[in-house]
Image: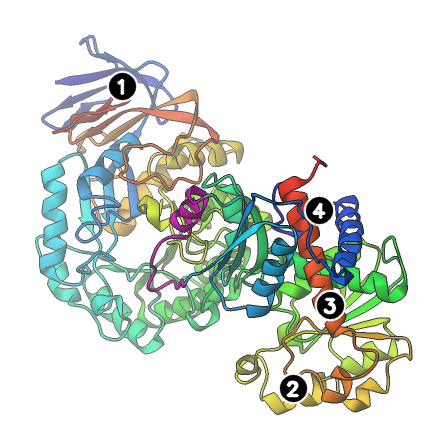
Amino acid sequence: MKNLVSIADLSREDALYLLDNAQQLAQVNDREVKKLPALRGKTVVNLFYENSTRTRISFEIAATRLSADVINFSAATSSLSKGESLKDTAQTLEALGADAIVVRHPMSGAAHQLAHRDWINASIINAGDGSHEHPTQALLDALTMRQLVGSNDDLAGLKVLIVGDIRHSRVARSNVLLLSKLGASVQVAGPATLVPAGFEKMGATISNSFEDSLEQQPDVVMMLRVQRERMQGHYMPSEREYTQNWSLSGKRLAMLKKDAHILHPGPMNRGFEISSEAADDPRAAILKQVSNGVAVRMAVLHELLAGERS
Amino acid sequence: MIVLKSVSLFGEKQTDISIADGIVVSLEPTSEKGIDCSGLVALPGLVDLHTHLRQPGFEASETVLSGSKSGVAGGYTALFAMANTNPVADSASVVEQVLTLGEAAGLLQVQPIGAVTKGLAGAELAGLGGMARSRAKVRVFSDDGMCVFDPALMLQALTFVKSMGGVIAQHAQEPRLTEGAQMNDSDLATELGLTGWPSVAEESIIARDALLAEKTGARLHICHLTTAGAVDVIRWAKKRGIQITAEVTPHHLMLTEELVRSYDPVYKVNPPLRSAEDTAALREALVDGTIDIVGTDHAPHSIEKKDCEWENAAFGMVGLEHAASVVQKVMLEGGRNWRDIAQVMSSKPAEIGGLTNQGRLDVDTEANITLIDPSATRTVTSQTHSASTNNPFAGVALPGAVVHTLFRGNFSFKDGEVVEK
């Protein structure tokens, strides 16, 4: 495996292989000396065109634990006033010795282009591109679900509900693709304006009522982070209407199964898409997701930079 | 005297074409010696109602000269130059400048299109009368690239242009429905995370403008149709007797949105590549005559405008040098003949644009002639005579090749080479 751009590029076997490795690497986090020499001498660049302290730090810790050198590069881009082009930046980073580039970009397809347009040879890891994909997030979510249900294999039969602004969510896209590959049944739910029909083709069912979805007794409820500014205007009449219909409130929390699990990719808007009661409920596995993020990113970096699997 | 020997006139009878002083003097076999054109189909020189020549203002992408070279290599003897230059062609002085540049290049007829609104801003009418009376004798007005979306302004523009015997060429794109739009609105757009460009954004403007044309009795031309629904609206409007004509580009006839999967901006175009069903509907409509003409929407862009993120990239593709091949394939496969190809690529665009000296191949007409080898096959390359390389057909094998082009009786393209003035 040379790049990780999209879940769509992974086979079920690829995904399980990465999850198995991540599961093993997760144990490094519990050791006193949290470091392996696997990527000594390799250079990983975090190329972030969008602020995301959490994802950047997660990749940074993952690379450091594998003894790679890590460089952080923040860049700005806009369709109106461009500075250096993506191509020039990437070529510069490669000339400086980058073996892998972890890229976060506000525009869909940026990681795909870096991987496929003959600009550079370095490995590309997509850390989120526009509304397209965020594959390591989906992998860490799947790893978390495996741990929660005690599976060492796929997620066959698991009922997962993803709630929020599905339209603009790269987390939703990557999760729908990965979870259905792993045998889970996935439903995406949100206001009709924010749930495009195309998600059905990607493998999910669609719901426009949170209550109806909860009545189907999902095993996992994943609440997406929602941008407040999108919840007024032509997608949604008001923030209040959004919260009333789509927040994981105390009342909706009571509808969940006792052994259900609550996930959120973070950072949370407490009191908006998720109530504090839900966020702090024992069924919430949000911090587990964070620590699994490091393990999954270690597994991906290891596979791309030192993998023996062709 | 030039004699083109043994041509296949409109793909039909074999004969000779004799030319003197820039005029066709005979279409009968003659004993005079001449240039052997056996196996070549002779058509009236192609006329493109929709070309972006980029000059003045964007000479890194194209100049009137480089665009003219690309035109003659594609078999064209007339190009209508779109108004979205810098400065915008919204006044007599700018359209006359473009006309002069075309005359200086001298390879084909460059006919300026005037902007409908000042600066293409969609707010106030441009100097339509002044452009019509200028040396460029503008008859086609278009804000192409932008839609004349204000219905009141469109109504006035149609009224005005009717009085000068002109036509408005509308770029049908409802702006509110296409804010931030990047590709066809579809399941694929959802999958790729790109903002969709709904068909209704095109169809609603066409329907509105058809009704405005009916009210005013003016002529309306719709640029680059892309959807099956737009074809239906055009059919309805024509049935109603509205003076409406429609255009399709070579790329919308053959290329679909599936190409966007690569995120390669060479496939980014306005209006966007659509579904396979839309493409099939467009081919059918061209074959059955609902769509009147093929316009290239030749839109050259320099490399850096395309070698970047999809959303940052410019919209547009070049088209002059493969248009005839695409049309040959679509029309002949659709059961039409070379006379029909001449109709959609030459006679009808000349008629819509008011060029009486173009679009005909007959005795006593100006000798604007294209000679095509219909049996050739060739693989399109991104390097052409255009100054730009943003060619979505690069690597695609197409039938037919333009061998010679004559403009006013002189070779502008001969044996596959541009004949510079």
- Depth check, front residue: B147 or B12: B147
Whether residues under marks 2 and 1 lie with C-beta atoms below 8 angstroms apart, the answer is no
Q: Place residue A244 in its image quadrant.
A: bottom right
Residue on which disc 4 sits = A10
Residue on which disc 3 sits = A289
Q: Amino acid at mark 4?
A: Leu
Please name the residue shown 43% across and 69% down the image.
B174
Give the SS element for disc 3: helix
Marks 3 and 4 sit apart, C-alpha to C-alpha, by 21 Å
Q: Amino acid at mark 2?
A: Phe
Whether residues under marks 4 and 1 lie with C-beta atoms below 8 angstroms apart, the answer is no
Q: Amino acid at mark 1?
A: Asp
Q: Are marks 3 and 4 on the same chain?
A: yes
Whether residues under marks 3 and 1 lie with C-beta atoms below 8 angstroms apart, the answer is no
Asked whether residue B167 appears in the rendered view, the answer is yes
Q: Residue A277 location, x and y as percent? A: 77, 88
Q: Which residues are magenta?
A: A76-96
